[in-house]
Image: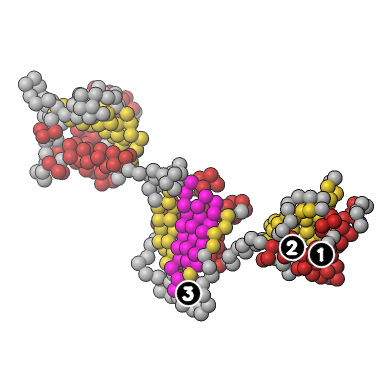
């Protein structure tokens, strides 16, 4: 039996030698649209122009202002199965074999169709938009209308505001506002807004609670909290939340919680994302708890349940009587002793507490420098907050209501440095 390979090669050569119109029509009949490159130019020279290019199932768009050069808009769209079917139908309906471009004396063309298949010269048709053939269904179902509409869609996509991206770094998070709102029902809820590294928290009580809601507060997030938050945002995969957690109009059957959660990513007016489109999601609490967004929900909801931070004292009067104060006594020349009341023996701690109570009303009259300087601090949130600094001559410290305090501090200074004035 003789090989069929030579015959196939001959047929391939005949097909390659066929006119471009015939080859394209054969592809359209067989539905082979992938090898075909289509270019659709809209507008005339000197006017605003656009160019649509479809090849390999992808559509791209260029645009030029009047008298300017074409520039790609940067949007690429994959044709859907319906769009591919309509494109093939439109190309079949125009009658490529009989289609003719405008000639001398005809109205100028503002639409140019260029079709190219591998191995053949391009096939070009130039016609005014109004003269492009329309199928029996009317112009709206024709090839020209389809290509114009596809170009319009790509242009709208290119010029539309892009959505705010999910932040991946602390710098990106600092340029956005992250907002979580939980609508309370029986269980509590509230609002958390994170902006420029600061959490603004407004708790709300549910109907089960008889006590008042905790007061609103704000505090700066720690580096560890920001790192956890960024990891939770990455794990939540918010770009695919519509797939992983489809929205519901009402809580699921058996969802006794029923609280609605809304999450927003909002651009700051003066941030790098100011021109971006805000994004938002609304889901029920229990649906999010069973999704990749659970760590993000827990991280933000924990701020609603956390007690408000303790405000640092603003005056000596607010800390008088406490037994956890920190007193630093400086005598110049690098001599200094620091006493943490919590670390002292009970008797000494109580003696020092009483000495501070007696001296407190008279400390504010002293300056901030002198032969002896007392710096008094109070622990707040794990850190020592300076309440005040009081100075003066040692002789003045030894007189009146400050004498007992000066005596205790001077005794510790002498033991700590081996020097003193007592």
Q: Examine the rendering and report whether any part of residue 56 can be seen.
A: no
Tag 3's secondary structure?
loop
Residue placed under numbered mark 2 in the picture: 362
First along the sequence among labels 1 and 2: 2
First along the sequence among labels 3 and 2: 3
Please state if 240 lies on the left or on the right of 402 as rendered.
left
Residue placed under numbered mark 1 in the picture: 400
- Specify the color scheme: secondary structure
Disc 3 residue crowd, few under 14, some 14–19, many 20+, Cα 10 Å:
some
Measured from the top left, where is residue 262 in percent x and y?
42, 61
Disc 1 residue crowd, few under 14, some 14–19, many 20+, Cα 10 Å:
few
- Check contact, mark 1 vs mark 2: CB within 8 A: yes
Tag 2's secondary structure?
helix
Tag 1's secondary structure?
helix
- Cα distance in 3D space between marks 3 and 2: 48 Å
Closer to the camera: disc 3 or disc 2?
2
The numbered mark at residue 206 is 3
Measured from the top left, where is residue 5 in percent x and y?
33, 27
Q: Which residues are magenta?
A: 175-203
């Amino acid at each position: 039996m003789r090989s069929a390979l030579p015959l196939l090669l001959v047929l391939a050569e005949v097909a390659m030698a066929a006119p471009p119109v015939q080859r394209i029509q054969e592809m359209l009949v067989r539905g082979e649209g992938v090898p075909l490159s289509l270019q659709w130019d809209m507008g005339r020279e000197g006017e605003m122009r656009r160019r649509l290019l479809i090849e390999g199932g992808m559509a791209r768009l260029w645009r030029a202002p009047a008298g300017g050069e074409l520039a790609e808009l940067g949007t690429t769209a994959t044709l859907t199965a319906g769009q591919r079917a309509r494109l093939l139908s439109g190309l079949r309906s125009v009658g490529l074999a009989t289609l003719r471009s405008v000639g001398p004396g005809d109205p100028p063309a503002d639409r140019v169709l260029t079709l190219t298949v591998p191995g053949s010269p391009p096939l070009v048709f130039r016609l005014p938009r109004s003269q492009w053939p329309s199928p029996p269904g009317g112009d709206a179902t024709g090839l020209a209308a389809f290509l114009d509409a596809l170009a319009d869609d790509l242009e709208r996509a290119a010029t539309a505001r892009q959505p705010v991206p999910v932040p991946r770094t602390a710098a990106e998070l600092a340029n956005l506002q992250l907002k979580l709102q939980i609508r309370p029902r029986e269980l509590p809820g509230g609002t958390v807004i994170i902006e420029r590294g600061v959490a603004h928290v407004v708790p709300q009580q549910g109907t089960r609670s008889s006590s008042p809601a905790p007061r609103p507060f704000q505090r700066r997030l720690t580096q560890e909290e920001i790192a956890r938050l960024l990891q939770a945002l990455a794990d939540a995969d918010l770009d695919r939340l519509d797939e992983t957690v489809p929205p519901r109009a009402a809580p699921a059957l058996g969802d006794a919680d029923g609280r609605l959660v809304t999450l927003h990513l909002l651009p700051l007016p003066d941030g790098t994302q100011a021109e971006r489109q805000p994004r938002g999601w609304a889901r029920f609490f229990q649906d999010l708890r069973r999704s990749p967004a659970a760590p993000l929900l827990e991280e933000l909801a924990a701020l609603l349940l956390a007690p408000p931070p303790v405000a640092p004292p603003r005056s000596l009067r607010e800390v008088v009587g406490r037994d956890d104060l920190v007193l630093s006594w400086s005598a110049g020349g690098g001599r200094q002793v620091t006493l943490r009341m919590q670390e002292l023996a009970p008797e000494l701690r109580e003696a020092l507490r009483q000495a501070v109570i007696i001296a407190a009303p008279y400390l504010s009259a002293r300056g901030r420098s002198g032969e002896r300087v007392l710096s008094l601090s109070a622990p707040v949130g794990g850190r020592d907050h300076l309440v005040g600094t009081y100075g003066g001559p040692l002789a003045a410290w030894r007189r009146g209501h400050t004498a007992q305090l000066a005596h205790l501090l001077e005794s510790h200074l002498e033991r700590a440095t081996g020097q003193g004035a007592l």
